[in-house]
Image (cartoon, rainbow, N blue to C red):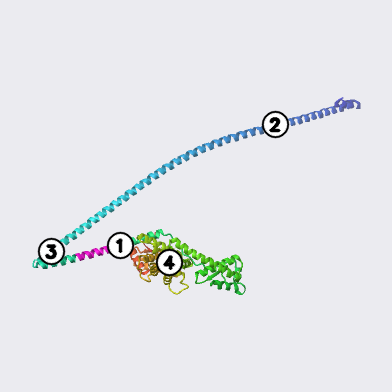
Amino acid sequence: MTVFGSVLICALSSGGIAGLAIGMVAVGAAIVAAAFLVYVKSSKNKLSHAGDEAKRIIEEAKLEAKTIRQDGLLEAKEQMNKMRVDFEHETKERKQEWQRTENRLSQKESALDKREEQLTKKDAALDKKIEDAEKANKQIEETKERLKNIEAELAGAQQKVEAELERVASMTKEEAAQELKTALLDDVKKDAAQDAKRLIAESKENAVKEAQNIISQAIQRCAADHATENTVSVVALPNDEMKGRIIGRMGRNIRALESATGVDLIIDDTPDVITLSSFDPVRREIARITLEKLITDGRIHPARIEEMVDKVRREVEAGIKEAGEDAAMEVGVHGLHPEIIKTLGRLKYRTSYGQNVLKHSIEVASLAAIMATELGIDNKVAKRAGLLHDIGKAVDHELEGTHIQLGVDIAKRYRESNEVIHAIAAHHNDIEPQTIDAVLVQAADAISSARPGARRETLENYVKRIEKLEEIAKSFAGVDQTFAVQAGREIRVIVKPEQVNDANTVFLAKEIAAKLENELEYPGQIKVNVIREVRGVVYAK
């Protein structure tokens, strides 16, 4: 039985028509409720079906979008690859075009260079032809002038002959012969004197040129260190505490060191250094090496100091002998007395105006030997004398006398030849050089000492020389400003353009150079550079 039937039966049983009406209402309500439930259920089914459909559509849309995106990426990649290929192809074509352009430019440049070279050669040939033509014209003019002079001389001679004939006509045969002999003898003497004078002048000129050539070749072939050397008289310390250890208790260490080496140790407020003072460069070197070894060793006491000084003294003496042997071997001088070799080695620690004397002696020996060879004479004496010329400087702090006198005494004591002794004695013009070897040693010594940078001069002398250089150049009329440059190797002179013209600048430079040569002492040479500058200045208002 359905719900509706149950409701109806209940209504009938309740009584009469009223009950029937109530039952009908109840049945209608039940039908409405049932319809509503059916509608709700159907709506839910539709909603569920619509949701599934919506999910399916979304999934399909996602798949389609993914497919479209992949297709788009592929298409973009293909487009990009195509663009890259096109770009690479275009770039390659442009590179090829640039290369072809560069090649054409290189060919044009090469052709221009060849053309320029040809034009340069043509200009040189043309200049030479012009120069030859000028020389020919000059020779023609000189020939014409000589012909005029000869004609004048002939005319004068003819007049003299006519006058002489008129005078001789009244002379005897013997008188005429005697006068003719006298005249011929006078002419011969006059011609001989002129020829002798000309030969002497030519000889001097050729001698100067040949000497310059020999000296320049000798300097070029002799490579030497031009830097000056400073005497090492300062020892670096690892710290200031080491000063106290060097001084020692009650000063016993420093006294032992000074007594053993003969060198004064100056310990002041200067941080981390000790100054060594001694007139003997060998003693100073022994003290320096000893002090450095003691600092490295760390054991500083009087017994150790004496032991280390003896050891270092033996090492230095061995080094001195080895330095002398090396110097003799380097220049090829053999047969020197062992004591001379030791004395020569002591020059390793001797300097003169900052120039190491042993290196200077080696250089002088090499220069003298080269110049002797160029002159075609035996170079053994020149080489030996050049090596020993300053040997007196090794003992000039121990013995009285100049280094030349001491060097001569040493050479005589060890039986050097008279030629070597004479060259040593004459290398500073204490005596007049009498042999070619002495002159060569003197020249080589001057060349080695005058090299740029070989010797240093005191700051005061340097400043005075520079000031004197500028003062001499400024003393000429028309000079506006002077500047000494390149450490005094060049003087630049600025002249007033309204007082000095272009033609006079060369003459002014020559006059300044001549005055510098006469009034100033300087090493090497000085370049005189005269500058004339004209400026037109107008102010716009």
Q: Residue at x 33, y 60 (%)?
A: 210
Q: Residue at x 62, y 34 (%)?
A: 70
Residue 60, percent from left and from top: 67, 31
Give the CA distance from mark 3 to mark 2. Answer: 152 Å
Q: Amino acid at mark 2?
A: Arg
Residue highlighted by disc 4: 388
Give the CA distance from mark 4 to mark 1. Answer: 33 Å
Residue highlighted by disc 1: 205
Give the CA distance from mark 1 to mark 2. Answer: 121 Å
Nearer to me, 430 or 326:
326
Per the image, label 4 sits on a secondary structure element best described as helix
Residue highlighted by disc 2: 56
Q: Amino acid at mark 1?
A: Glu
Q: How many marks?
A: 4
Per the image, label 1 sits on a secondary structure element best described as helix
Residue 93, percent from left and from top: 48, 38
Q: Is residue 169 left or right of residue 147?
A: left
Q: Nearer the viewer, mark 1 or mark 2?
A: 1
Q: Which residues are magenta?
A: 188-206
Give residue 368's quadrant in the image.
bottom left
